[in-house]
Image (cartoon, rainbow, N blue to C red):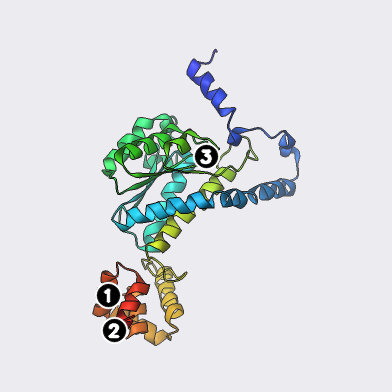
Amino acid sequence: MTPTPALAALRAQLATLTTEAFRPELADIDRLPTLDVARLMNADDATVAGAVAGQLPRIAAAIDAITERMARGGRLVYAGAGTAGRLGVLDASECPPTFATAPGQVVGLVAGGPDALVNAVEGAEDRAEAAVADLAALGLTADDSVVGVSASGRTPYAVGAVEHARRTGALTVGLSCNAGSALGAAAEHPVEVVVGPELITGSTRLKAGTAQKLVLNMISTITMIRLGKTYGNLMVDLRASNDKLRARSRRIVAQATGAGEAEVEAALEEADGEVKAAILVLLSGVDGATAGRLLADAGGRLRAALEAARGD
């Protein structure tokens, strides 16, 4: 069967990508003892952090730009296909319990929709127009930030999302693992973490997936730090929705204030269970209602609220 011109062109394009390259030194990997394969894989993974380090200035610039938009009410939207899309959804889904983000404040879009989180939806990644429709359904605005995620940097869904977002005036970031990618060219902030060929040729859920997870961790976590969602390195904006988080909230109040168990319980009761307000109650001596007002006036930033309470 003769390949179509489009398929031939795609094959030629893939042959130029670092993430798709074949490593002849691993051609007999299936004959090696399991421990040796594990060592090879572990050594491969150890190179990822260094590749991310090379992109830190670009990552930091993107985070500052995202923070500026989120501070004025914008949303953070991840868009990708396959592993890249699932990683975006994972990062978005962890923001509400970790940082008490509002519903819809951090959003993950995956090509093929929710079913693609657990099943391969073949062909979904090839539809740039689907990304446009998904972003349109969100009512994308110029205050929003869209991070397209694609290991290859050529995935039509991710590139289409970034191109549409940029036309809308939204901030755009292109996270990929190949230099000179179409995704990077489309985005205002290109972040290209070149991790090299994979242990299993073309399986970009490996090093490329790890690199994407590390960068997404940075984007969401540092943005939330900049937005005042932490107090030092304490997760003071967590949503205590289960027993583990309720126990953690008490530990955090104690760690921030040095208060004993009875004082912590009393402060949390006074603050209706809100960790930041309870810390403010203990450190400044105000009541729960005043703590809530000071936090609201400070935009939820605990340090600023403490300074206001102390008259600094």
Disc 1 to disc 2, C-alpha distance: 10 Å
Q: Secondary structure at mark 2?
A: loop
The percent coordinates of residue 161 (x first, y second) are: 37, 37
Given residues 39 and 7, the one toward you in this image is: 7
Badge 2 or badge 3: first in the primary sequence? 3
Q: Are marks 1 and 2 in contact (CB under 8 Å)?
A: yes
Disc 3 to disc 1, C-alpha distance: 44 Å
Asked whether, in this view, residue 207 is left or right of residue 43, the answer is left
Tell me the crowding category of disc 2: few under 14, some 14 to 19, or many 20 or more residues within 10 angstroms, Cα based: some
Tell me the crowding category of disc 1: few under 14, some 14 to 19, or many 20 or more residues within 10 angstroms, Cα based: many
The percent coordinates of residue 84 (x first, y second) are: 48, 42
Q: Amino acid at mark 1?
A: Leu
Q: Which mark is residue 294?
A: 1
Q: Is residue 166 visible?
A: yes
User: Which residue matches tag 3?
Assistant: 151
Q: Secondary structure at mark 1?
A: helix
The percent coordinates of residue 162 (x first, y second) are: 39, 38
Q: Amino acid at mark 3?
A: Ala
